[in-house]
Image (spheres, grey):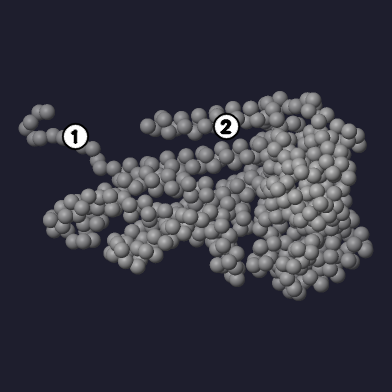
């Protein structure tokens, strides 16, 4: 058994390597690392589409949480809701475009320029779809909005914003650092939610959200006398973070729209750009691609080595382990408490309430439960996303573990209980010494499998500002604009982690098995 279990991870790794080899042929060589090098060619005759009108009725991809669809609906009659597909990262959209799952990517000009500079086979449609303007998001009727607008107007006038844009879109990465927070912060510290997947405006360098908008906020906070605390979130969660009061400001490529102004405050624009379409460049199909091993080495370096990203992955792994282990232990204790409550009165109020909790948690998507607790139940409290995640997964695992244990207890033959009582055991002794050991041998394998599922379920905690393993993978993909290798790398880490935890728990489970001793009768040879 041990050899088989040890071989399983290696067989899976080989299988993943084969999948990588098959998929690598569709991943062309990246040609640049800067938005300044985004213009592949001024000849757009080889683009699959030439005008905006040709995109009507086509399949369009955009980032989840963006407002591009709403803006296009108000400016064109040819775009419809059914045309749009929504993705959690730009790397996913680009991969979908290059593999013909969508016909065009709709995005901001700076993001489009960066995507084109890092990928062959795509280009920007010359005609802007809509002129666009970016602003910061604050809570409705925020006392900071007027102060922000005043500083933005001053920075536009004195050229500060122009200098920041030049800094963060240049090819010189050595200069892309944020100012040290050494200014007077006597007025307090404000929380900033960053959608760190929109380079060069907002993205992640190491464990710190960076980019032009974050740099601009540093200037604003310095002049206003506030400290700044940043946290990285998925783009779709940014406005909810501000509305719930968990963040004072949110930043990314936020288009200023009338619909958003109804829900939150939008500052005056600090950047005037536009919405563009990225389409396939058919001439690039014939471009030379990297060999498998050359491409593998380059992808490995971009994913793990560049900017010390292995440290980011390690920190995400630790967060995933922390949430999983604490939730698993606490959930197991909660589940056992449910069993004890049910045992007293099987059809009583406690049994009905526990059954209702199991049905509720089992019938709702994990991400919905997580966001309800974070933004509604604890919306008015300043509480860490990690704490909320542990609480939610404790309840989820406790409900499922309690159900598994209770079914195992009920499966023990009633004769076992009668035999225990015949030996003089009381009710509690019969349960703990006779029923529970037998039930444990039945339910432990199921509990181990449920715990492995718990580890995988924690991959959604990035929606509530928790930087776990999956969220770190998304941030890296946003930086490299490469969907395939970072996904495979994170998948391998999850697989090895789950197999390792299952193996360790199976060693513990062996102790619950009855000892097999040879049968022997003194004086008799068998």
Q: Quadrant of residue 126?
A: top right
- Work out whether residue 174 or residue 273 is closer to the camera in this orientation and state it: 273
The reply, left or right, for residue 434 in relation to residue 483 is left
Q: Can you tell which quarter of the image residue 52 is in?
A: top right
Residue drawn at 76 percent across, 42 percent down: 58
The residue identified by callout 1 is 518
* SS at badge 2: helix
Q: Which residue is mark 2?
A: 16
Could you say where residue 97 lies in the image, as x and y percent from the top left? 73, 38
Can residue 94 be seen here? The reply is no
84 left or right, relative to 380? right
- Asked whether the residues under the numbered discs 1 and 2 touch, taking CB atoms below 8 Å apart as contact, a structural biologist would say no
Q: How crowded is the residue under tag 2: few (<14 C-alpha within 10 Å), some, or many (20+)?
A: some
Distance from the alpha carbon under mark 1 to that under mark 2? 45 Å
In this rendering, the count of numbered labels is 2
- Vertical placement of residue 118 versus 134, above or below: above
Q: Which quarter of the figure is the N terminus placed in?
A: top left
Q: Residues within 10 Å of mark 1 (few under 14, many from 20)?
A: few
Residue at 54% x, 59% y: name it.
369
Q: Residue furthest front?
A: 77
Q: Which residue is found at the position 39% from the left and 32% from the top?
A: 2
Where's residue 244, x and y in %? 64, 67
Which numbered disc flags the more N-terminal residue, 1 or 2? 2
- Residue at the image position 64 percent from the left and 27 percent from the top: 22
Left-right relation of 136 to 303: right
Front-most of residues 247 and 205? 247
Under tag 1, what secondary structure?
Answer: loop
Percent position of residue 352, x then y: 37, 64
Residue 308 percent coordinates (x, y): 68, 44
Q: Is residue 429 above or below residue 413?
A: below
Point out which mark residue 327 bears. Answer: none
Q: Is residue 161 visible?
A: yes
């Amino acid at each position: 058994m041990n050899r088989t279990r040890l071989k399983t991870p290696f067989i899976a790794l080989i299988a993943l390597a084969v999948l990588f080899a098959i998929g690598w042929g569709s991943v062309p060589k990246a040609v640049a690392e800067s938005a300044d090098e985004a213009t592949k060619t001024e000849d757009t005759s080889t683009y699959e589409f030439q005008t905006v009108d040709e995109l009507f009725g086509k399949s369009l991809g955009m980032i989840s949480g963006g407002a591009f669809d709403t803006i296009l609906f108000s400016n064109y009659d040819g775009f419809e809701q059914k045309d749009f597909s929504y993705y959690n990262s730009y790397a996913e959209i680009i991969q979908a475009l290059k593999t013909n799952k969508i016909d065009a990517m709709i995005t901001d000009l700076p993001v489009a320029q960066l995507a084109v500079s890092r990928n062959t086979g795509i280009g920007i449609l010359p005609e802007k779809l809509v002129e666009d303007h970016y602003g910061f998001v604050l809570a409705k009727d925020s006392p900071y909005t007027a102060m922000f607008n005043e500083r933005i107007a001053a920075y536009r006038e004195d050229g500060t914003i122009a200098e920041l844009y030049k800094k963060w879109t240049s090819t010189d990465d050595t200069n892309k650092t944020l100012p040290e927070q050494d200014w007077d912060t006597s007025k307090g510290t404000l929380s900033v939610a960053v959608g760190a997947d929109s380079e060069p405006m907002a993205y992640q360098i190491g464990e710190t959200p960076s980019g032009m908008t974050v740099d601009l906020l540093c200037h604003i906070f310095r002049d206003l006398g506030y400290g700044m605390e940043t946290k990285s979130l998925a783009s779709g969660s940014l406005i909810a973070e501000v509305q719930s009061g968990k963040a004072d400001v949110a930043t990314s490529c936020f288009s200023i729209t009338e619909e958003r102004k109804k829900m939150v405050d939008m500052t005056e624009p600090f950047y005037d750009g536009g919405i563009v379409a990225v389409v396939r460049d058919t001439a690039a199909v014939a471009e030379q691609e990297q060999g498998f091993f050359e491409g593998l080495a380059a992808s490995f370096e971009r994913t793990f080595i560049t900017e010390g990203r292995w440290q980011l992955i390690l920190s995400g792994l630790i967060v995933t382990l922390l949430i999983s282990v604490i939730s698993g232990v606490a959930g197991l204790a909660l589940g056992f408490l449910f069993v004890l409550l049910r045992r007293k009165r099987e059809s009583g109020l406690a049994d009905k309430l526990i059954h209702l909790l199991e049905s509720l948690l089992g019938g709702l998507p994990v991400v919905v439960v997580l966001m309800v607790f974070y933004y509604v139940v604890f919306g008015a409290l300043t509480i860490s996303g990690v704490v909320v995640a542990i609480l939610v997964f404790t309840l989820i695992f406790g409900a499922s573990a309690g159900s598994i244990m209770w079914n195992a207890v009920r499966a023990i033959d009633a004769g076992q209980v009668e035999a225990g009582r015949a030996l003089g055991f009381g009710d509690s002794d019969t349960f703990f010494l006779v029923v529970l050991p037998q039930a444990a041998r039945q339910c432990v394998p199921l509990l181990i499998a449920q715990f492995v599922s718990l580890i995988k379920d924690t991959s959604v905690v990035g929606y509530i500002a928790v930087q776990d393993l999956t969220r770190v993978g998304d941030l890296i993909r946003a930086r490299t604009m490469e969907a395939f290798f970072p996904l495979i790398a994170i998948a391998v880490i999850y697989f090895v982690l789950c197999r390792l935890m299952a193996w360790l728990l199976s060693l513990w489970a062996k102790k619950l098995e009855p000892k097999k001793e040879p049968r022997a009768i003194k004086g008799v040879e068998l």
